[in-house]
Amino acid sequence: MLNNLLFSLLRTALWAREEVWHSLQTKDAGQILKEAEKQTVAALVLDAMDRCGAKLPTEVVLSYFSYSVAVAQGNRRLNAAVRALGRSFEENSVSYAVVKGQVVASLYPNPLLRQSGDIDFYCDNENIDRAKEILSREWGVVFDDTDSDKHLHFDKKGVTFEMHFSLTSFYSKRKNGYWEQLLREDKGTEVSLDGQPVKTLSPTLHTLYVFLHLYHHLMELGVGLRQFCDLAVMLHAYNTEIDHDALRLHLERLGMERAFRTCGSILVQRLGLPAEEFPYALTDKERRYGDKILDVVFYRGNMGHYNKCSGFHGWRHNIESTGIKISHFMKFMPLAPGYCCRWIAHELKRKISTKLKWNGK
């Protein structure tokens, strides 16, 4: 029941549909907001409660009003950081694309209410060294080139940046090649952040990437409802700009079509995305699997932070995380079997390689 009210409030926040006016009870508000915080959508939900005229306990209002103010301040800080990054790259003719985060937030009815995280941006092989040079010289960034096989991260004035030279992997040379070709051929677009244009991926490719990022983290440790809200908002805002035929083709060739359709059942059935704005007609089977995904979403919360054994570090943490991943693989294997199998093989190979390296020492 409370989860149904949470979805009603999210529909109000995303599409201005005031459908909870008579069903929201004061006693439920605190519990709903706790779940919304777990899903990183509390600022959206509080705003929807306010617009629906909900009467909230004073202590709840004070607590979550402070939370919402912090979310808005975080968005302003990150927007300023993205604008500064864009100016540095434009002035030095560096090609880049900011992805997810503030770019997606700009599509929300109220961008300041989407809870922010860090700043992700992509530079291809022709621009990555130049980007590092500019950031080192003008921003004083010191890079650790062993940071990751996909990105380098750095902090600037309390903001975390991730500079990606590889946005995702399908653990397949052929599929990775297809994805990289899409990136090379992408013409990109711009969004406005407080009046300044910022470069990002084209609507079709960016929507595909936001889904791929969502599904990757769902399979790992879990995601929150914010990631589904992001995808819904993108499909709505870019409805006339997305090449739906191309999107379906990319999903099919990457082996992710059924996973996308299943996640779409949550967007349409629960978050209220108009059915005609989703690229596929949905079936009961996809809706049932969508409910299985929601079981994980509500149990694990955003990025799988909840219902884990606290205090685990080192090998115990690795064992717990591996157990969670295996559980998710078993649940969702039918949605993208090739992707799951390749990922498992990759993880096993990596762990064996790491163990052999340590034994060699």
Image (cartoon, helix red, strand yellow):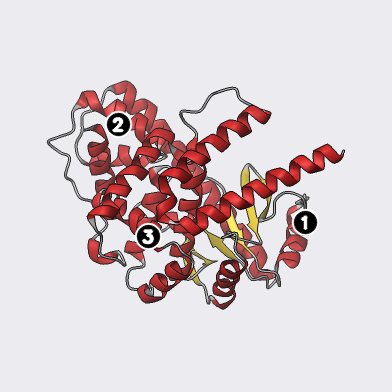
Quadrant including the C terminus: top right
Mark 1 sits on what residue? Answer: 136
Crowd around label 2: few <14 · some 14–19 · many ≥20 (10 Å): many
Amino acid on which disc 1 is placed: Ser
Numbered badge on residue 188: none
Circle 1: element type: helix
Amino acid on which disc 2 is placed: Ile
Where residue 166 appears, as percent x and y from the top left, is 63, 61
Where residue 213 appears, as percent x and y from the top left, is 50, 54
Quadrant including the N terminus: top left
- Nearer the observer, 143 or 231: 231
Q: Residue at x 67, y 30 (%)?
A: 315
Mark 3 sits on what residue? Answer: 258
- Nearer the observer, 294 or 242: 294
Q: Residue at x 71, y 44 (%)?
A: 352
Determine contact: label 1, label 3, CB under 8 Å.
Answer: no
Q: Nearer the viewer, mark 1 or mark 2?
A: 2
Hey, which quadrant is residue 21 in on the image? top left
Circle 3: element type: helix
Reading the chain from its start, which is encountered first: label 1 or label 2? Answer: 2
Q: Residue at x 68, y 49 (%)?
A: 349
Amino acid on which disc 3 is placed: Arg
Mark 2 sits on what residue? Answer: 32
